[in-house]
């Protein structure tokens, strides 16, 4: 290279030195310090140790995860932290789950107050007939029976059997035995009517449990007449009342025929024992 080329190269180096000198000598704003207090620059090992201590101290302080800092600038960051988006889970509806098992029954609560009376419902259908009740609980008893055949008594007592039934409430009078059976204790009224026979004696008793209570009697006469007897008796449960033809020395008879009823026996309850 000639002397002219060396001169040009030297001139270029001088120009570059003047142009880059102020830029290379400038210090960053964050690292400027007062004169006389500047510390000597640290090498790479010391810088790494200082960064490690700074990071550990800040990690113990648990800074927010959204904030970050530049390694070379401990000042305020340039960008604001972006908040984490929040999702409202209540507005997200999933599919319907299966029905769970039935839980244990809880304790019974306190009895509430009686509510108001409801409206009257529609009338129901008629029920079926029930079983017959006990006849002792019936507060009524009545009968009236008759006989259309004559009756004679010779050497023995004879119960008067009736063949015509006018009234027999609840069947308290037995047409086969000729007796009234008491199923409702209380006071009863009885009446006996017969027709006598010409030239024959009429001699009857109204009986109660095998004992004569009252008598109906008519002497021998040329004319036949109607005779009657009535009384009131206080009966207990299962007492029996009937009419018996008496056994006498003379022929005893009562008259009747198939066309008319001459003999009648009636009775009814006046007051049951259950009433005060």
Image (cartoon, helix red, strand yellow):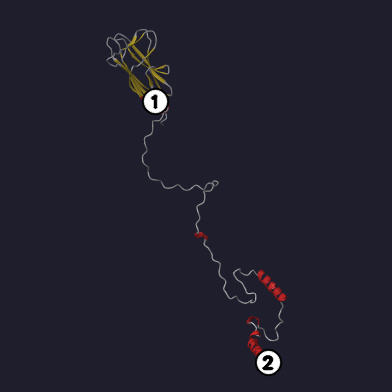
Quarter of the image where the C terminus is located: top left
Q: Is residue 169 above or below residue 49?
A: above
Judged from this view, the residue extending furthest toward the front is: 2
Q: Quadrant of residue 26?
A: bottom right
Q: Is residue 212 above or below residue 2?
A: above
Give the residue at mark 2. 3
Q: Quadrant of residue 154?
A: top left
Q: How many marks?
A: 2
Q: Is residue 59 left or right of residue 202?
A: right
Looking at the image, do the residues carrying marks 1 and 2 touch, with CB atoms under 8 Å apart? no
- Separation (CA) of disc 1 from disc 2: 175 Å
Compare marks 1 and 2 and give the one earlier in the sequence. 2
Q: Is residue 14 above or below residue 122?
A: below
Camera-side residue: 104 or 88?
Answer: 88
Q: Position of residue 52 (x, y in %)?
A: 69, 72
Camera-side residue: 56 or 167?
Answer: 56
Quarter of the image where the N terminus is located: bottom right
Q: Is residue 31 above or below residue 105?
A: below
Q: Is residue 67 left or right of residue 51?
A: left
Give the residue at mark 1. 187
Residue 115 is marked as: none
Q: Position of residue 124 (x, y in %)?
A: 37, 38
Q: Secondary structure at mark 2?
A: helix
């Amino acid at each position: 290279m000639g002397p002219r080329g060396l001169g040009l190269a030297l001139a270029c180096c001088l120009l570059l030195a003047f142009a880059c000198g102020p830029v290379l000598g400038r210090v960053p704003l964050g690292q400027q310090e007062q004169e006389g207090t500047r510390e000597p620059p640290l090498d790479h090992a010391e810088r790494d140790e200082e960064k490690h201590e700074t990071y550990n101290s800040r990690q113990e302080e648990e800074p927010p995860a959204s904030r970050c800092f530049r390694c070379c600038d401990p000042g305020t960051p340039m960008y604001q932290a972006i908040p984490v988006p929040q999702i409202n889970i209540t507005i997200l509806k999933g599919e319907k789950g299966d029905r769970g098992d039935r839980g244990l029954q809880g304790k019974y609560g306190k009895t509430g107050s009686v509510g108001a009376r409801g409206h009257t419902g529609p009338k129901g259908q008629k029920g079926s007939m029930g079983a017959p009740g006990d006849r002792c609980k019936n507060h009524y008893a009545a009968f009236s029976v008759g006989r259309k055949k004559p009756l004679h008594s010779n050497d023995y007592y004879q119960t008067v059997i009736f063949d015509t039934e006018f009234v027999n409430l609840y069947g308290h009078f037995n047409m086969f035995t000729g007796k009234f059976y008491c199923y409702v204790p209380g006071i009863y009224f009885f009446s006996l009517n017969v027709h006598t026979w010409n030239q024959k004696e009429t001699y009857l008793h109204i009986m109660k449990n095998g004992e004569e209570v009252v008598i109906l009697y008519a002497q021998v006469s040329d004319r036949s007449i109607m005779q009657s007897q009535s009384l009131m008796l206080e009966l207990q449960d299962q007492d029996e009342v009937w009419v018996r033809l008496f056994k006498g020395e003379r022929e005893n008879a009562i008259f009747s025929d198939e066309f008319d009823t001459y003999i009648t026996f009636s009775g009814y309850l006046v007051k049951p024992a259950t009433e005060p």
